[in-house]
Image: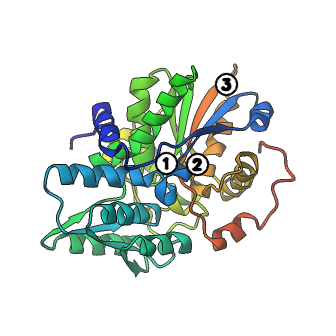
Amino acid sequence: MILPTFFDVQAAQQRISGKVDTTPIVTSNLLNDWLGHTVLFKAECLQKTGAFKLRGATNFIQRALAEERLPDYIVANSSGNHAQAVAYAGAQAGRDVTIFSTENISAVKAQGTIEYGADLRLFPTRLEADDAVKVAASEDNVIWIPPFNHADIISGQGTATLEALQQCRAQDMTPNAVFAPCGGGGLVSGALLATRELAPKAQVIGVEPQNANDASISLQQGAIHTLTTPPDTLADGAATPAIGDLTFALLQELDGFYEASETHIAYWTQWLHHLLKLHIEPTCCMTMAGVVGWLAEQTSPQTVLVMLSGGNISAQSMQKIYAVDYLTQTPCL
């Protein structure tokens, strides 16, 4: 097992330059006043296809193209954002794409995947979809782009944090901590690689749903844990049954890890929509539960960088998120 390095993240940034958008960093003065700290948000919800996943998919495909090893057919397994990213990046490279996902995939992510030109195949569970993609990948002239457990994917996702830290440096701001949501672990693993080099004193912390806490259990037990039933969580982008061996090795180097309840996920989705005026997925909004928990332990004003991973939310998810009105409650829980 060879883990990616910061130099791989740098190479990925050069490789995908001009093919993905540079996304802004935003903040809320009202939220900062409430917290007594500065929270910076990297708005990957404004990325092409609406999520950071395009970075990893583009890096994978562009490297394979440059090395003349990209076949005619691409397959991938995903709960949504990786599906859209591979569909888009594959189409840009002139390749046919088939995505394997679950029947409970977010409707808006499913539609986006189809509109980007991919063939979408659905299965009752994530494990069945994962098994099916392995079979498809064994065919001739086919390449499999995994959602997180690949060095090129992790390196590509790391460019989001690399870019954010470069933007912070240009504005003379250095974060004391970097927070990212954790599903399969690709984003927070890439964040670790970038932060250790550009802001070595900053802590890197992951957050995942309590209802999909395979990574948390894995870190506690010291071995990869696989969930036995499909996770029931608003944070559908983090509803993976298990992390991979590459991401697990990097997650073990994190400075902290938090679990977010479904109440906190809905609460912070509502509040970040209101405060930032951005359409943001609950998967990244849940990260604020970890931020608030960490800030409560600090004794001086802190600057925190939060990775807003995506902005693709279905109408059904929005109804669940707003089933209870949390905007009448001042942050923070």
Residue 326, position as x, y percentages in the image: 81, 56
Q: Earlier in the sequence, mark 2 or mark 3?
A: 2
Q: Which residue is depicted at the point 60% across and 46% down? A: 287
Question: Rounded to the nearest whole Å, what is the CA distance between mark 3 and mark 1?
Answer: 22 Å
Dot 2 and dot 1 residues touching (CB under 8 Å) = yes
Residue designated by label 3: 298
Q: Is residue 178 left or right of residue 151?
A: right
Write down the quadrant of residue 157 in the picture: top left
Residue designated by label 2: 259
Farthest residue in the right direction?
328
Q: Name the amino acid type tagged 3.
A: Gln
Q: Earlier in the sequence, mark 3 or mark 1?
A: 1
Mark 1 neighbour class, 10 Å CA radius: few under 14, some 14 to 19, many 20 or more? many
Q: Is residue 131 left or right of residue 184?
A: left
Residue 125 seen in the current view: yes
Residue designated by label 1: 216
Residue 38, position as x, y percentages in the image: 68, 29
Q: Which residue is depicted at the point 63% across and 27% down? A: 303
Q: Nearer the viewer, residue 171 or 310?
A: 171
* Quadrant of the rendering where the N terminus is positioned: top left
Q: Name the amino acid type tagged 1.
A: Ser
**Of the two numbered discs 3 and 1 in the rendering, the one whose residue sits closer to the viewer:** 3
Instruction: Say if 200 sits above or below 77 in the image.
Output: above
Q: Earlier in the sequence, mark 2 or mark 1?
A: 1
Q: Which residue is depicted at the point 79% across and 37% down? A: 30
